[in-house]
Image: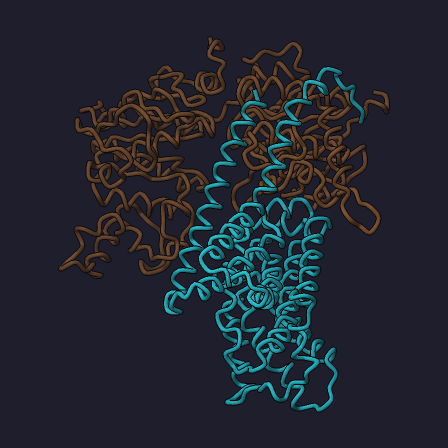
Amino acid sequence: MTPAAAPVLSLRHAAKSFGAVQAVADGSLELSAGEVHALVGENGAGKSTLVKMLAGLHRPDAGELLVDGKPVALPSPAAAQAAGIAVIYQEPTLFPDLTVAENIFMGRQPLLPGRRIDRRLMRAQSAALFGRLGVPLDPGRICRGLSIADQQLAEIAKALSRDARVIVMDEPTAALSAAEVARLFEVVRTLRAAGAAVLFISHRLEEVFEICQRVTVMRDGRQVLSSELAGLTADDLVRAMVGRQMPERTAGERSEPGELVLRVERLTREGVFTGISLAVRAGEIVALAGLVGSGRTEVARAVFGIDRYDAGTVAVSGRQLRKASPSAAMAAGVGYVPADRRQQGLVMDMSVQQNVALASLAGLRRAGLVRSAAERAFAADWAQRLRLKYGRLTDPVSLLSGGNQQKVVLAKWLGRRPALLIVDEPTRGIDIATKAEVHQLLVQLAQQGVAILMISSELPEVLHIGDRILVMREGRLTAEYSHREASEEKIMAAATGQLAVQAP
Amino acid sequence: MRATVPAAAGTAGEPAASGSRRLTDRVFRIRESGIIAVLVVFVAVTASIQPRFLSSGNIQFILVNTTVFALLALAETMVVVSRNVDLSIGSVLGLSAYVSAGLFGQVPGISIPVVFLTGLGIGLACGAANGLMVSIGRVPSLVVTLATLYIVRGIDILVVGGNEVIAQTLPDGFTQIPRAGLGGVPYLAIVIAAVIGAGAYYLRSFRSGRELYAIGSNPDAARLAGISVGRRVFTAFTVSGAIAGVAGVLWAAQYQTIDSTAGTGYELQVIAAVVVGGVAIFGGSGSAVGAAVGALLLQTISSALNVLGIPPLWIQAIAGLLLLLAITLDRAISVRLLTSLRVRSSGVGT
């Protein structure tokens, strides 16, 4: 290999843990000038953590980073910028009240004598940058109201103005229309022709094959494949991305589904999800799989009545639910365990017992006042049933571990004896032992006749727990599998739009 | 790095670019011209009912009363654009007014510049204390300055006791400051207008000034852009306090009788003026000139209600109603603007 071909950036054996969770175990990446390099992997494979290392937001626990062959440390975003690395996020962070030109040059504005900002030159330089990128964007326009695509272009112009040689694009196409993607790709080709190294992260494999020359695949925080794209197929990539193991549910744990509990017909919220029809029966666990941002949580929120929907119907136990009314959904026997338990599932400053009793206060009242003794007995009962590990029931719930906090959220809804339980990412950020307990709990609930709709981004969990698996992609249901016919490859293919790829 | 520019792209970009250029230009003019239009209409209507409103005496009265008000609006603008608020300026003004003007009685023959420096020093100290707590202590400015509003007022009450500064102790040279003028226009109003112009120019054309807007527009992005957010916010509060201190001395020269209630509640009037003047209460946009015109408008309204013979009991309620009207109008304009920008950008985007 000649020195000229030395990589611009190379990350070797990087590792990063957050508490007990290892996000990246062995991350390696090599970027060369004039190439567009794809970084792909399942949700939770460690891509975002890797990007944050390059952006100077996370410091790796181990490993080394070389820029132009020299080791560098990136303790801050400023250090990453100084090293010539620019990160374009899916949703850029601009100053909405300032002009495009000001956004590009903030802190580095060209100056006139007397240290005044040379607005004319700033605008001209911005216009020149957009000229180089070949896109018409007015530098004098304020950023508020710019489309996501245009905001990304402003960020790319900013990166150019800083002479960035490594440009990281974190799922830039997720929120773009087809025309905008085409325009972005033109810009990426221009950057590449100019000698930049572009790291392109995307779940859409057809885009990867269209724009990239090399690919790095991550799984469980490790690099599992790094190679030229030429000669590879989408099937090869999907196979490299999946492959974690988890024990199957035994046949005895699967019960025959009973009566129809939830029926959703052609549910549509414009621009978010379209024509969602699904059914969940008593005793059945239906897993809703798909990538983050594919609209799964939004469907759940609409079903539970948190968000409005534009068309379609939701019926529980044969009775149609009123739109946008969580209390109507609760009265019909629906429970909802949100993905973000700290923000949405719990009142963090309140005690364990208050949180458990929160959804069942009506039954614990006398003359309009909540009886503390009844609340305590109620909470103690559920804590024992769910094997909750806690100090005292009066401790704030924030003192519990993530897994036990999740049990509190579950207990809150189980106390209402729900007919339908919607759980969103029930085991995110939970240690392995408690995770198995939560899985066991969901299976037991199904055996007792509760209908469960589970959203999960973890394919092993989906396969392990789900009786039926529905896959969403970009706001639509794209596939349905029984647990017998489902495989990680099939689900991943349906979630990334590679339906043609079928496991043999 | 260098890229070959596709020749067609540049020319294709021209028409769209100049179209939205015109639009943004109009936007910036609208933000101040709207409030000026309201002012002109209000003056015209009032003058047609009561011609005495446009007498030189009344105009002078309005201008004199606006000076201190508009100066404080400049101070508040610097803080508000950075997504903060300074509620303590009324109290700082009161303390500065009593202590500095009190010097004439306690130190015979003290020179007027020393008195101004005293007021400046008091304001600087209060502002720096606010700034430290907000930037280093990371306490929300609403809480910090609400606390210092009471603390500074409390100190004022302790210092003043039951006393007051009376007009007889003040030298003529001092009390003439707000009154001296040329053909009905006070010199002071001209000086203050120049100061506000300079402040607006600083906010508009210097890096540190623009960074205040950036911080107010998106604090996280500001940090990512490498702006030292803490230092900028600290400076904004310190300057705000210093201006309030100087405003206190001017207040003393104007009203001459100062007890421990001077400037009570003034901070809310100033914030009202700033918001009426088009400064976004959550930061990021607006100009000091707009804020000063807002002050002039509010002062004109209260003066007009007086001239029109509306019972004083009604004045506050009516002033509040007009404030609401002005802000609603401004809000409606900016919402329509945002929609038109969205339409434009979707046109460019495809």
Q: Quadrant of the N terminus of chain B?
A: top right
Colour basis = by chain
Q: From the viewer's side, name the closer residue of A53 and A285.
A: A53
In which image quadrant can residue A51 be found? top right
Is B273 left, or right, of A193 in this rendering?
left
Is residue A61 among the parts visible in the rendering?
Answer: no
Residue A462 vs B337, above or below: the answer is above
Q: From the viewer's side, name the closer residue of B32 and B3.
A: B32
Residue drawn at 72 percent across, 38 percent down: A64
Residue A221 placement (x, y as % from top left): 58, 33
Q: Quadrant of the C terminus of chain B?
A: top right
Residue A64 vs B243, above or below: the answer is above
Residue drawn at 33 percent across, 48 percent down: A408
In which image quadrant can residue A197 be found? top right
Residue A330 placement (x, y as % from top left): 23, 40
Residue A115 vs A102, above or below: the answer is below
Q: From the viewer's side, name the closer residue of A426 and A299.
A: A299
Is A30 left, or right, of B154 in this rendering?
right
Residue B125 placement (x, y as % from top left): 65, 73
Residue A288 vs A444, above or below: the answer is above
Is A387 left, or right, of A205 in this rendering?
left
Chain A painted colour: brown
Residue B301 placement (x, y as % from top left): 48, 60
Q: From the viewer's side, name the closer residue of B256 and A296.
A: B256
In which image quadrant can residue B164 be found? bottom right
Is residue A210 among the parts visible in the rendering?
Answer: yes
Q: Residue furthest left?
A: A367
Chain B painted colour: cyan
